[in-house]
Amino acid sequence: MSHSPVENVVIVGTGCAGLTAAIYAGRANLNPLVLEGSMPGGQLTTTSEVENFPGFPAGVDGFQLMQNLREQAAKFGTRFEQTLVESVDFTSMPRKLICADRTVLARAVIISTGASPRLTGVPGEKELYGGKGVTTCATCDGAFYRQMEVAVIGGGDSAAEEALFLTRFASKVYLVHRRDSLRASKIMADRATTHPKIQPVWDSVPVEVMGRPEGAVSGLKVRHLKTGAESILPVKGIFVAIGHVPNTGPFASVLDVDDNGYFKPVAGSQVRTKIPGVYVAGDCADHVYRQAITAAGMGCQAAIDAERWLAEHE
Ligand code: NAP
């Protein structure tokens, strides 16, 4: 397996955190290398309108925002390579990132691998995931459900946002939530619960995704938690929006993670880890705020810390 030359700083991940780190590291003349995983641009590329990123009073398309960040990073000398990190060796310098095709060597590393959508695990969900009716991305798949009934599962901002987006296409959107109010921000919750096409299904959990594995979704069986009654929602599409799991697997045996798998930085820092010169940023290390702007802020912090650390360890 081949080794690359020793990089100043390698950034793993291309979401808001990784690309912001790349802009800062690039402007600091560190010639950063960014390793892109299987979803370039990260979660924002699956969002429609981003209304709360400062500086865009009219909102900005999530995909476009990520394109802009990438262009800005490239302008300052960032290089991009598509490869998946499978494991790491941080026991000596340079740090080693072991990928399928080669080992990448780096003096400093910024891990910004984000988080992936969580699924419910009910029978039928896995079998009918993908092009068969179960999905986690309304922006990607919503247009396939014109004039059809669909269900969104979840009660957070993502669920509210997905449900509202789907009203552009679907004839009716069931919003299935296990409690009797949404956890989403008030503005999103109000918009969703008052929309004429959205019907909340309170106190209910999915029990089974109906449909033949070789065919398509024909319904969602739900159970009312207070009465135990089961019913079938006659939907063709099911959009799961129940949160995320952090993508920390290849690093979790080497860096500290919490009970849910999120990176735990050292006390007094949001981004520094127990390994000198190794930083974490964005949703893989943040289960509290999880916003595009906070991820970008962490990417900025990680790049500035990495730059200072490299300068001190010439
Ligand atoms: P979230 O806030 O963690 O909400 C997850 C939802 O799924 C909760 O309502 C939860 O129920 C429910 N849930 C979890 N596990 C479940 C299960 N096994 N079965 C059924 N329901 C389940 O996640 P999110 O909506 O993805 O949002 C993540 C972060 O991104 C938040 O900080 C959010 O504010 C932010 N975000 C912001 C925007 C925006 O500002 N436009 C858009 C999207 C996301 P409980 O309520 O009972 O816990």
Image (cartoon, rainbow, N blue to C red):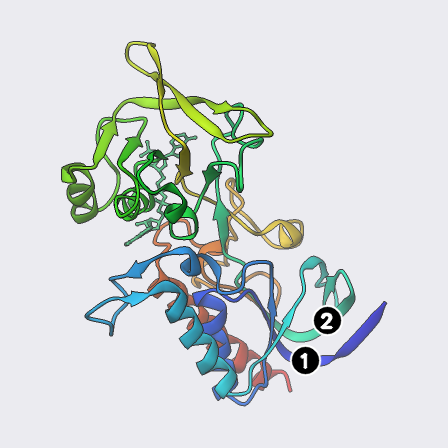
| Quadrant in which the N terminus is drawn | bottom right
- Location of mark 1 (residue): 7
| Label 1 CA crowd tier, 10 Å (few <14, some 14–19, many 20+) | some
Contact between labelled residues 2 and 1, with CB atoms less than 8 Å apart: yes
Residue farthest to the right? 1
Please indicate whether residue 236 sits to the left or right of residue 193 in the image.
right
Q: Is residue 3 above or below residue 197?
A: below
- Which of 182 and 281 lies nearest the eye of the viewer? 182
Please indicate whether residue 166 sits to the left or right of residue 212 in the image.
left
Q: Is residue 314 above or below residue 187?
A: below
- Location of mark 2 (residue): 104
Amino acid type at image mark 1: Glu
Q: Is residue 179 above or below residue 81?
A: above
| Quadrant in which the C terminus is drawn | bottom right
Amino acid type at image mark 2: Val
- Tell me what residue is drawn at x 28 percent, y 13 percent: 226
Q: Position of residue 142 (x, y in %)?
A: 38, 46
| SS under mark 2 | strand
| SS under mark 1 | strand
> Is the shortest distance between ligand 1 and the CB of mark 2 under 8 Å?
no
Ligand 1 rendered quadrant:
top left
Q: Quadrant of residue 65?
A: bottom left
Lower position in the chain sequence, tag 1 or tag 2: 1
Residue farthest to the front? 147
